[in-house]
Amino acid sequence: MNLREMIETALFLAVGYVLHAVVPPILLGMKPDLLLAVLFLVILRRPSFRNALLAGAVAGIITALTTSFPGGQVANIVDKLVTSMVVCALVRMSTRLDRRVVAAGVALVGTIISGAVFLGTALILVGLPGPFAALFTTIVLPTAVLNAATVLLLHQLLTAVERRLRPASSPATGSGR
């Protein structure tokens, strides 16, 4: 991972932090984790296990510091680390599929995995403010759909921007100087 890739990852995670900070809690102190959507974009762009592990750790620490879930600090770190590794493996295995399908699919599956790991870890460590099934159904599943749409939209936007910013292959401009 070179410096440019690390800076890009840091910038994406900073944007994810802002999104995570401004989204209000929806039910029982829980809120959609849009930093997770940004984490998926980071992994889609640079699907190395090293990058996924680093981005997952940073995302976990950020969400642990900003969580509104009572006692959810450890659960956030565990879920981001597990999710980033699983998503990275999924992205690396899906090289022959359309990138839009991969983007939406990993966001949907990754959010479901993340939510299940978070709720499971929180249940074991501190308990949940409601039944697991109710929280999974009312928070995780809608967030998974939202993240899939968000990641698909942002992935398409980033791809279009990259195409425009890539220098066009132009003929040599031998000016004779």
Image (spheres, rainbow, N blue to C red):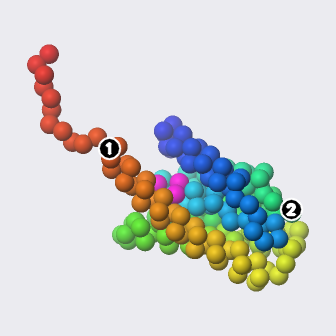
Of label 2 and label 1, which has the lower sequence position?
2
Q: Where's residue 102, x and y in %?
A: 45, 69
Q: In this picture, which residue range is highlighted in magenta?
A: 41-45
Residue sitting at 70 percent across and 81 percent down?
137
Which of the pair 11/46 is nearer the observer? 11
**In-image side of 114 versus 160 (left or right):** right
Describe the element under mark 1 as helix, strand or loop. Answer: loop
Which labelled disc corresponds to residue 166? 1
Q: Residue furthest top?
A: 177
**In-image side of 118 versus 106 (left or right):** right
Residue pointed to by mark 2: 71
**In-image side of 133 versus 49 (left or right):** right
Magenta highlight on residue 99? no
**From this viewpoint, is residue 113 visible?**
no
Q: How many marks?
A: 2
Residue sitting at 77 percent across and 82 percent down?
134
Which of the pair 55/41 is nearer the observer? 41
CA distance separating discs 2 and 1: 45 Å
Q: Where's residue 70, x and y in %?
A: 86, 63
**Amino acid at pointer 1:** Arg
| Residue 134 versus residue 170 in the image, above or below | below
Q: Residue furthest right?
A: 126
Q: Main secondary structure of the magenta part?
A: helix
**Amino acid at pointer 2:** Gly
Residue sitting at 46 percent across and 54 percent down?
45
Q: Residues within 10 Å of mark 2 (few under 14, many from 20)?
A: some
Q: Where's residue 32, x and y in %?
A: 68, 65
Give the quadrant of the C terminus: top left
Describe the element under mark 2 as helix, strand or loop. Answer: loop
**Which quadrant of the figure has residue 175?**
top left
